[in-house]
């Protein structure tokens, strides 16, 4: 397990001597984001509380960077791991800035005196979460959503290697949810922050997570990448929803696109390219996509996430201009991913297959993605 920064072995959690979830096996590389999903009451929070040692595991071990969490002293653990759980935090006559300052407790002396470096980190954390305007406000006099943002700033201020979050966006509106996940993704990419969290928002879980653990019954029912978890039909089974009411292709907000010169060209269509777009966005890889009709299922996600989209008007043939632009992008990209069903017929499909042949003739590495697998 040396390749993993965080992992569990034989972990069983529960309350009052009664096991709730058995033999939990999770593994993460440094800088990856793990999300726990599952029905209400499945035990997601219990798992998180056991990981952070708020609850004693009934069996098994949690490892961080090769060391057992259970053997770490409290101060060492608090320097490496920061936690934001659900539930209302009660403070007495504290400003929001003072609440964030408490995140520096692993680094201050016995008297809790902040250095200039500590105060600088407090300010930077508040700027990141965009709450500087709340600095002098009474923490108990602001909204639930604002309090959640203050607690997130406090967690970041702690400079952790691992951030544990229990439903971190439950009180946030859509704007702040997008901003929060954008910040989280940036920190995981640039600072190699490892994140373990629970979420109810499946659309965001699909976009931001590197790994997803599905909690159901007394076990982790499935553990894998978003592409593996959101395969056709599984989410409906996880939540016991009739499949006709579980459309995972519903359009919803995307995270910020990775801008820059495209490194990958994605041959897409009929919704098959959207999981690829999101995977590339998570990995921080700029890409181009095409050729798409502008009413294709993949088009909204491509417009939101791709550096460039080669498209034509709905139900029109692919003209020479679109073909030439697609070939030029293939020439400049290092790789081509084909998410198009090779069995489709018709002129449009034939033109897309001709682009695939062009890429192979040019010696470009070509991989195929099938969302049904």
Image (tube, rainbow, N blue to C red):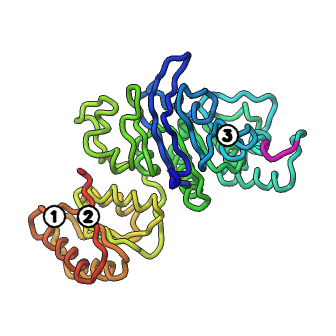
In the rendered structure, which disc, 2 or 3, sits on the residue that comes first in sequence? 3
Which span of residues is magenta-colored?
Answer: 105-109
Q: Which residue is mark 3?
A: 151
Question: Image check: 43 left or right of 277?
Answer: right
Residue 328: x %, y % from top left: 31, 82
Q: CA distance from mark 2 to mark 3?
A: 43 Å
The overriding secondary structure of the stretch rendered in magenta is: loop
Determine crowd level at label 3: few under 14, some 14-19, many 20+ residues with C-alpha closer than 10 A: many
Residue 342, numbered circle: 1
Q: Residue at x 28, y 67 (%)?
A: 367
Q: Nearer the viewer, mark 3 or mark 1?
A: 1
The answer to whether the residues at label 1 and label 2 have Cβ atoms under 8 Å apart is yes
- Horizontally, residue 212 falls left or right of residue 54, namely left
SS category of the residue bearing label 1? loop
Do tag 2 and tag 3 residues touch (Cβ < 8 Å)?
no
Closer to the N terminus: mark 1 or mark 2? 1
How many marks do you count on the picture? 3
Q: Position of residue 210 (x, y in %)?
A: 45, 51
Q: For residue 235, which quarter of the picture?
A: top left
Q: Residue at x 16, y 65 (%)?
A: 315
Q: Quadrant of residue 349?
A: bottom left
Placement of 141 over or under 328, stated as above or below = above
Q: Which residue is mark 2?
A: 368
Sequence order check: which comes first, mark 3 or mark 1? 3
> Crowding near pointer 1: few (<14 within 10 Å), some, many (20+)?
few
Q: Position of residue 347 (x, y in %)?
A: 11, 70
Q: Which of the two residues, 203 or 41, is positioned nearer the viewer here?
A: 41
Q: Secondary structure at mark 3?
A: helix
Nearer mark to the viewer, of 2 and 3 = 2
């Amino acid at each position: 397990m040396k390749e993993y920064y965080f992992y569990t072995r034989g972990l069983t959690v529960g309350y009052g001597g009664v096991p709730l979830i058995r033999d939990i096996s999770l593994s993460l590389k440094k800088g990856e984001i793990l999300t726990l999903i599952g029905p209400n009451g499945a035990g997601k929070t219990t798992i998180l509380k056991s990981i952070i040692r708020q609850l004693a595991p009934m069996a098994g071990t949690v490892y961080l960077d090769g060391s057992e969490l259970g053997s770490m002293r409290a101060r060492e653990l608090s320097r490496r791991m920061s936690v934001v759980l659900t539930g209302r935090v009660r403070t007495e006559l504290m400003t929001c800035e003072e609440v964030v300052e408490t995140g520096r407790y692993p680094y201050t002396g016995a008297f809790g005196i902040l250095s200039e470096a500590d105060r600088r980190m407090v300010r930077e954390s508040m700027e990141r979460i965009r709450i500087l305007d709340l600095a002098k406000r009474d923490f108990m006099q602001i909204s639930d959503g604002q309090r959640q943002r203050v607690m997130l700033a406090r967690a970041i201020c702690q400079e952790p290697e691992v951030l544990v979050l229990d439903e971190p966006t439950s009180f946030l509106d859509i704007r702040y949810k997008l901003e929060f996940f954008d910040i989280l993704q940036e920190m995981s990419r640039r600072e190699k922050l490892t994140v373990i969290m629970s979420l109810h928002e499946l659309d965001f879980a699909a976009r931001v997570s590197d790994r997803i653990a599905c909690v159901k019954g007394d076990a982790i029912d499935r553990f894998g990448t978003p592409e593996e978890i959101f395969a056709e039909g599984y989410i409906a089974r996880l939540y016991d929803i009739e499949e006709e009411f579980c459309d995972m292709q519903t359009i919803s907000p995307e995270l910020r696109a990775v801008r820059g010169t495209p490194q990958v060209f994605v041959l897409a269509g009929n919704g098959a390219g959207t999981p690829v777009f999101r995977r590339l966005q998570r990995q921080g890889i700029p890409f181009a996509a095409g050729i798409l009709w502008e009413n294709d299922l993949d088009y909204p996600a491509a417009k939101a996430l791709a550096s460039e989209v080669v498209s034509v008007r709905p139900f029109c043939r692919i003209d020479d201009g679109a073909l030439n632009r697609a070939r030029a992008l293939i020439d400049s990209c290092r790789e081509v991913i084909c998410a198009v069903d090779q069995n489709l017929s018709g002129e449009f499909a034939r033109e897309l297959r001709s682009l695939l042949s062009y890429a192979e003739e040019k010696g470009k590495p070509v991989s195929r993605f099938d969302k049904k697998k």
